[in-house]
Image: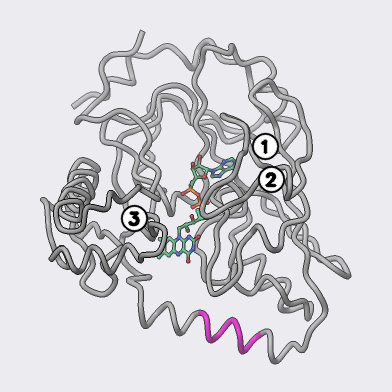
Amino acid sequence: MMAAHATSHLIENLPPIRGRMQADAVLAAATWFRVGGPAEVLARPADADDLAAFLASLPLEVPVTIIGAASNLIIRDGGIAGVVIRLARGFGDVTIEPDGVTAGAAALDAVVAEHAAQAGLGGVEFLSGIPGAVGGAIAMNAGAYGSDVAATLDWAEIISRQGEVFRMSCAELSLSYRHSTLPAESVVVRARFFARPGDPAAIAARMAEIRASREATQPTRARTGGSTFRNPPGARAWELIDAAGCRGLTRGGAQISQKHCNFMLNTGGATAADLEGLGEEVRRRVRAATGITLDWEIKRLGIPGSRPAVLP
Ligand SMILES: Cc1cc2nc3c(=O)[nH]c(=O)nc-3n(C[C@H](O)[C@H](O)[C@H](O)COP(=O)(O)OP(=O)(O)OC[C@H]3O[C@@H](n4cnc5c(N)ncnc54)[C@H](O)[C@@H]3O)c2cc1C
């Protein structure tokens, strides 16, 4: 079937970039769940100057969506209208400083933790177990094992939808549980984390402990999106899901993990609709069993359905 996005002429009317731009671009392969329709246009700017110039000239009516390592996303089957920005190589540098580490937003969290550890810097070990990239970590205030971005971030460099480059301090981002006040459609391009000299053996041991604990409790090698729902105040989402009888529940190719029932899996042929529908069924069953309404932690982006309507 021919992609409906192929009939879109958006790409012909966009400002140029030095990086790469592609119409009707497959996104599913770049996501942890391996589901979802195409981007009307996928833009991969060469560096921050390229991105800033592109956004400054991009008509404001064109919607912009940012994706990172797509480890906390369901991209819907109809794809994403407008421009999807994915940061690539020009945003992957990691620089070690005596009391911190500065990283491009496309650097994987685990790579940042690894660089810091090799330099004998501690404080960012928690990043070693999070499969996303730095930009997503800030947008989501990623955290694990007793720490989070809020506890370690110095500042983030951001490009606004209008193409202005500015910094926000950790306090200005008002980071809270899996939440930040990053302005809409703005892109994190770089960030600095505080780190401190420590015993290299102890830092390495802490990272090994985090990896082992994850392997034991989470389906880390599966097609998943991490925690599906936020923990409600005073409760744990996985316990509510388990108590509502949803462990192992399936819909199409989507399944609630047997290993950790706040994780959903694509067992092979799942669509985004299977995954989102399964999540909604879990919310319904948990509400019926406990009176508690679970809130999605996974971001769902794009247009429902098999293919998008023809775009103007
Ligand atoms: C096996 C597994 C385990 C996980 N464990 C944890 C965990 O322990 N703790 C935890 O917090 N999370 C966990 N996650 C979820 C996920 O890894 C984190 O939320 C991560 O920070 C998301 O980063 P990402 O680059 O994949 O972002 P994406 O999933 O691509 O995007 C998430 C959100 O961030 C926005 N975003 C991404 N990049 C940028 C950018 N450069 N600028 C502006 N906005 C941006 C997107 O628009 C979207 O709203 C886990 C996921 C998996 C698959």
Give the number of the mark in front: 2 or 3. 3
Q: Earlier in the sequence, mark 2 or mark 3?
A: 2
Element marked by disc 1: loop
Residue at label 3? Answer: 228
Asked if 204 appears above or below 107 in the picture, the reply is: below
| Magenta-drawn stretch contains 156 | no
Residue 55 in the image, given as x and y percentages of width and height: 65, 22
Q: Nearer the viewer, residue 168 or 158?
A: 168
Question: Would you identify the image quadrant in which residue 5 lies?
Answer: top left
Tell me the amino acid under the disc marked 1: Ala
Residue at label 1? Answer: 46
Give the residue furthest to the bottom: 201
Q: Residues within 10 Å of mark 3 (few under 14, many from 20)?
A: many
Q: Residue at x 54, y 48 (%)?
A: 179
C-alpha gap between disc 2 and disc 1: 6 Å
Q: Earlier in the sequence, mark 2 or mark 1?
A: 1
C-alpha gap between disc 1 and disc 3: 32 Å
Q: Quadrant of the N terminus?
A: top left
Residue 224 in the image, given as x and y percentages of width and height: 33, 59
Q: Is residue 153 left or right of residue 5?
A: right
Assess mark 2: CB under 8 A from ligand 1? no
Q: Residue at x 49, y 21 (%)?
A: 63
Cβ–Cβ under 8 Å for marks 1 and 3: no
Residue at label 2? Answer: 90
Question: Which region of the structure is painted magenta?
Answer: 204-210
Give the residue furthest to the top: 312
